[in-house]
Amino acid sequence: MVWHESATWRKVLKSLPKRIASAALELETDDGKLLIVKAHYKAHWSLPSGVIDPGETPLEAAIREAYEEVGLTILKGDVSFSRIVNRASTSADTYQFVFRALLPAGFNESSVTLQAAEIDAWALVSRSDVLKGERDYGKVILDWAHGVNGYAEHTFGA
């Protein structure tokens, strides 16, 4: 029997902490502005994002969340990897996969359809807008404004 198929290995896997994973999509205009959303249950602005469903890849989740939260159809081939964020808090440790795509051709204000049950507002912001700090932005947006790519670590809470 192969080690990774053994009862011992299954026991080891069950003993390890479980981590939730989420995915987010940085949707940018041609001139470098970022689409952000304000969920009614968060104090800060964030990216279209959410938990990765069972059987779904991080990329599929990011695309699905963009469609659910702002009504935009994004194609897999138009998306690139931006970073993975190790997120540690007092309530959970998670990974967030962040992807990037340009907003679809012909994008305008009427292109956005907000998910009424979750999202209250949306906006387009530049890096300089974010760095001014006039809104409460989530850490993933601050990373975008600072040009962070690849790997990042965020801590939340005490």
Image (cartoon, rainbow, N blue to C red):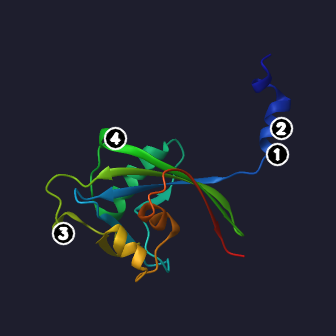
The image shows residue 41, relative to residue 16, as above or below, that is: below
What is the x, y in percent for residue 117? 39, 73
Q: Helix, strand or loop at disc 2?
A: helix
Kindly state the secondary structure of the residue where label 4 is placed: helix
Circles 3 and 4 in contact, beta carbons < 8 Å: no
> Split into 4 quadrants, where in the image is the C terminus?
bottom right
Q: Secondary structure at mark 3?
A: helix
- Mark 4 closeness class: few <14, some 14–19, many ≥20 residues within 10 Å: few
- Identify the image quadrant of the N terminus: top right
Q: Which residue is mark 1?
A: 15
* Spatial CA span between label 4 and label 2: 36 Å
Return the residue nearer the eye: 64 or 141.
141
Q: Callout 2 environment at 10 Å: few (<14), some (14 to 19), or many (20+)?
A: few
Rendered location of residue 101, percent (x, y) = 32, 50
> What is the number of the mark on residue 83?
none
Which mark, by number, is residue 109? 3
Residue 129, quarter of the rendered image: bottom left
**Between marks 2 and 1, how big is the CA–CA gap?**
6 Å
In the picture of the structure, the residue carrying the numbered disc 4 is 76
Q: Label 2: which residue?
A: 11
Q: Amino acid at mark 2?
A: Lys
Residue at 76 percent across and 51 percent down: it is 17
